[in-house]
Image (cartoon, rainbow, N blue to C red):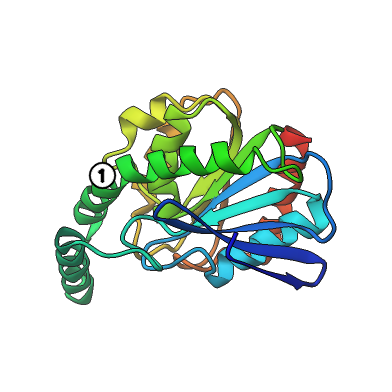
Amino acid sequence: MTSQTSVDGVTEQSFTLGEIPGVLFTPEGAAGHRPLILMGHGGGQHKQAPGVLAGARLFASKGDFAVAAIDAPCHGDRPKNEQFIRFVGDMRTRMAAGEDPGELVAAMHDLLSEQAVADWRAVLTAVRELDHVGDGPVGYWGVSMGCGLGVPLLAAEPRIRAAVLGLLGVRGLAGSAARVTVPVRFLLQWDDTRVPRQQALELFDALGSAEKTLHANPGDHGEIPAFEIEDALRFFVRHLG
């Protein structure tokens, strides 16, 4: 642990595990074991992006969960390699021209996913050794890139019992999605200008989970309604206790 602060009844502890920077959120004064939620951020964001902070603080304060967030490879406080920088430049060029960058996005997620899965598994093991977290049930939250890196994680990590995913299409993920069997809540923005609606529906369909629900709301890519975060809390309480 490198630093600690408290905000509205939630303790936030910054940490570094090897080369992985992260933040652990817990109820202030937390003692004993509790369920853990892993929160993956979106592309171009980091472990303390506004959406991550809002969700993590809600899950810790109202759900009594521990929440871990880390910088994905090539994001936040982590170094960016040349291949990643080229991907980002090409994607911005395509988006500025009104073209679909989906293939490049899928290729970038594929570039990052192996390291991201290894990072999350290492962090999961380390955080569960803490006295105020323990080895209770684990959930995952990740939309957009958080979904693109989260689907391979769910396919590989049996300790995760439930997940909130979404804002992404099926490109490059069909195989991993078929191996996901935990309950999933999938978020879709009906007017998403970055992710074709049909691609997102196909990813939902590809998930191998027997229990999965699709929540579609009006609005563009980053306009998830605030009530979906509250509903996600109830989803995690139901599946993680």
Examine the rendering and report whether any part of residue 218 can be seen: yes
The C terminus appears in which quarter of the rendering? top right
Q: Position of residue 138 (x, y in %)?
A: 64, 36
Along the viewing direction, whichever of 40 and 231 lies nearer the viewer: 40
x and y, in percent, of residue 216 in the image: 55, 52
Question: Compared to 6, does 101 lie above or below?
Answer: above
> The N terminus lies in which quarter of the figure?
bottom right
Which of the 4 image quarters holds residue 82? bottom left
Q: Does residue 186 appear anywhere in the picture?
A: no
User: Under tag 1, what secondary structure?
Assistant: helix
Percent across and percent down for residue 66 are 70, 49
Q: How many tags in the picture? A: 1
State the residue at coordinates (31%, 61%).
Answer: 74
Q: Is residue 179 left or right of residue 99?
A: right
In the visual, does 11 lie left or right of 173?
right
Q: Is residue 72 above or below residue 176?
A: below
**Residue that appears at 61% across and 35% down:** 162
Say if 64 sits above or below 151 in the image.
below
Task: Kindly identify the residue that appears in the image at 47 percent across and 39 percent down.
Answer: 122
Q: Which residue is mark 1?
A: 110
Q: Closest to the observer: 89 or 32?
A: 32
Q: Residues within 10 Å of mark 1 (few under 14, many from 20)?
A: some
Q: Is residue 90 above or below residue 185?
A: below
Task: Give the amino acid type for the residue marked by disc 1 in the picture.
Answer: Asp
30 displayed left or right of 201: right
Instruction: Check the image and name the residue furthest to the bottom.
Output: 96
x and y percentages locating residue 92 in the rendered image: 22, 72
